[in-house]
């Protein structure tokens, strides 16, 4: 029998085991025909703007009458706004403003939500589209399933609110009713609710909500007259809320 040195024998055994192990691993890892999962593309927006700084001072002066009559220090504080409480500034931010004038008080709020899909098969945009659709169906149930165009007919917004009405409270043209909006972001809608709170003055809240890619923006503009007999004007509030929403849409696109 030939004598094999110990070192040579050990080397031969290691080589043999390595060769056998490699062949086995190759067979185990090879999975012919396995589907390749491609992750859905991320949304356009990765961050959100500073909400209390995104509205120009000139716009705030127009939307919040009475503020200019305040002492300068109080004016600055009012125009600075109050940030909304949020726990993730990359996902949700917002700001609030309020002014008091002899004839009425006005409240303005804006909110930005960046939608993120945690399902690799669903894009951020698709997830944002689903979230927006739910918001639209909740605000405008009569428009459920629609994604664009301008409806006709009346709306129902709940027992405590009524559809948009003119200054005299007698009614309004169809173009002031809650509706879908064209030409604002990827999709948008407007709601107009007149709330009656017992013996206090009626207050009207106009909400404009739009989606751009994976970001949903909400503008709420409210007026409450000082006199119980007065009704806030739909047309004025809607025009101003829409103008602000379009400015915010342009800011996001920059």
Image (tube, rainbow, N blue to C red):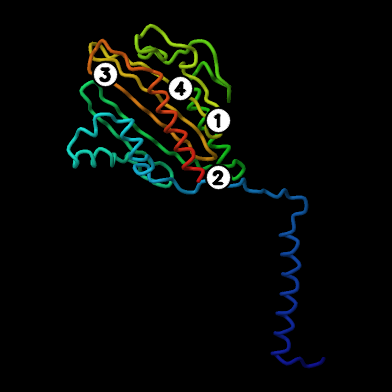
Q: Which residue is mark 1?
A: 183
Label whose residue precedes the other's in the sequence (4 or 1) = 4
Disc 2 and disc 3: Cα gap in Å? 42 Å
Image location (x, y in percent) of residue 213: 55, 39
The residue sitting at the left extreme is 71
Secondary element under disc 4, as helix, strand or loop, is: helix
Q: Secondary structure at mark 1?
A: loop
Between 230 and 180, which is closer to the camera in this rendering? Answer: 230
- Circles 3 and 1, Cβ within 8 Å, touching? The answer is no
Residue drawn 52% across and 25% down? 181
To which residue does mark 4 refer?
139
Q: What x and y, as percent, mark residue 154?
A: 48, 10
Evaluate if marks 3 and 4 touch, with contact meaning CB atoms under 8 Å apart.
no
Residue 83's quadrant in the figure? Answer: top left
Q: Earlier in the sequence, mark 3 or mark 4?
A: 4
Which circle, 2 or 3, is nearer the viewer?
A: 3
The residue that appears at 53% across and 28% down in the rendered structure is 133
Q: CA distance from mark 1 to mark 2?
A: 20 Å
Q: Nearer the viewer, residue 187 or 124?
A: 187
Please name the residue that numbered disc 3 is placed on.
225
220 above or below 122? above
Depth check: 104 or 203 in front?
Answer: 104
Relative depth, front residue between 246 and 216:
246
Q: Secondary structure at mark 2?
A: loop
Q: Which residue is mark 2?
A: 43
Where residue 242 sits in the image (x, y, percent)?
A: 44, 28
Separation of residues labelled 4 and 2 (CA atoms): 25 Å
Rounded to the nearest whole Å, what is the CA distance between mark 3 and mark 1?
31 Å
Q: Which of pointers 2 and 3 lies earlier in the amino acid sequence? A: 2
């Amino acid at each position: 029998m030939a004598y094999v040195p110990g070192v040579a024998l050990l080397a031969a055994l290691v080589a043999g085991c390595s060769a056998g192990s490699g062949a086995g691993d190759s067979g185990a890892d090879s999975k012919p025909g396995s589907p390749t999962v491609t992750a859905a593309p991320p949304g356009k927006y990765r961050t959100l703007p500073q909400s209390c700084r995104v509205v120009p001072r000139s716009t705030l002066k127009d939307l919040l009458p009475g503020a200019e009559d305040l002492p300068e220090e109080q004016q600055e504080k009012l125009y600075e706004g109050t940030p909304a409480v949020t726990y993730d500034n990359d996902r949700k931010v917002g700001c609030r403003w309020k002014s008091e004038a002899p004839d009425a008080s006005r409240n303005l709020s804006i909110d930005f939500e960046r939608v993120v899909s945690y399902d690799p098969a669903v894009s951020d945009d698709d997830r944002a589209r689903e979230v927006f659709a739910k918001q639209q169906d909740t605000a405008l149930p009569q428009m459920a399933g629609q994604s664009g165009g301008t409806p006709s007919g009346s709306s129902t917004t709940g027992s405590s609110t009524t559809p948009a009405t003119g200054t005299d409270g007698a009614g309004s043209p169809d173009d002031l009713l809650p509706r879908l909006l064209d030409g604002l972001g990827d999709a948008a809608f407007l709601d107009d609710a007149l709330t009656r709170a017992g013996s206090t003055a009626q207050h009207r809240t106009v909400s404009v909500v739009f989606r751009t890619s994976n970001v949903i923006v909400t503008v709420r503009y409210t007026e409450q007259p000082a006199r119980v007999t007065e009704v806030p004007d739909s047309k004025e509030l809607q025009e101003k809320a829409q103008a602000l929403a379009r400015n915010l849409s342009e800011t996001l696109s920059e």
